[in-house]
Image (spheres, rainbow, N blue to C red):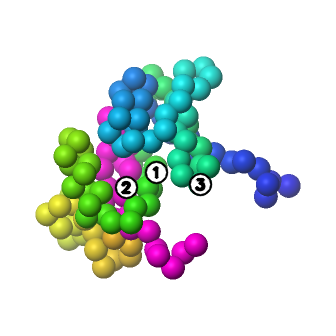
Amino acid sequence: MLKDSKAFSGFSVDDISKAKDFYGQTLGVEVRDGPMGLLELHLGGGALVIAYPKENHEPATFTILNLPVEDVERAVEELKAKGVDFEHYEGMTDEKGISRGQGPTIAWFKDPAGNILSVLEEDPSAG
């Protein structure tokens, strides 16, 4: 019944204008204004994610969006140059905020609303 559904995911933010700047300018994602004040994030492979304003927004305590990249180290450097701060988890991440050797190479950061995102290294054999 749903196998051909064009599913999409969504998450809340507390300031749609800041989210638009962050996702569009800082991360370089294609961002479009959607209906009812939503933001549409158009990602690679045709994926669609929406961000919606929520007055009583509370940041997610888990990773809401994983962004695969070819080189996590380079992505971290480029995002740091744009003012992005990376999370540091004791015993899990190095001084740059990168976790290596415990699954995929990955680094976590937050959007302006406090939601957790990641850049993670693509599996070259996938796909």
Q: Please, what secondary structure does the residue beneath circle 3 have?
A: helix
Q: How busy is the neighbourhood of tag 2: few (under 14 within 10 Å), some, or many (20 plus)? A: many
Q: Position of residue 115 (x, y in %)?
A: 38, 43
Reading the image, the residue beneath label 3 is: 45
Q: Nearer the viewer, residue 96 or 54?
A: 96
Q: Please, what secondary structure does the residue beneath circle 1 have?
A: strand
Q: Viewed as shown, does residue 81 lie left or right of 36?
A: left
Q: Please, what secondary structure does the residue beneath circle 2 have?
A: strand
User: Can residue 51 be seen here?
Assistant: no
Q: Can you say whether 116 is above or below 19 in the image?
A: below
- 103 within the magenta span: no
Q: How busy is the neighbourhood of tag 1: few (under 14 within 10 Å), some, or many (20 plus)? A: some
Picture disc at residue 65: 1
Q: Residue at x 54, y 25 (%)?
A: 33
Reading the image, the residue beneath label 2 is: 118
Mark 2 or 1, nearer chain start: 1
Mark 2 or 3, nearer chain start: 3
Q: Residue at x 33, y 70 (%)?
A: 105
Give the extent of the magenta segment: 106-127
Q: Residue at x 63, y 45 (%)?
A: 8
Quarter containing the C terminus: bottom right
Q: Please report contact status of discs 2 and 1: CB closer than 8 Å, yes or no.
A: yes
Picture disc at residue 12: none
Q: Residue at x 38, y 76 (%)?
A: 103
User: Can residue 79 be seen here?
Assistant: yes
Image quarter of residue 118: bottom left
Mark 1 or 3, nearer chain start: 3
Amino acid residing under circle 3: Gly
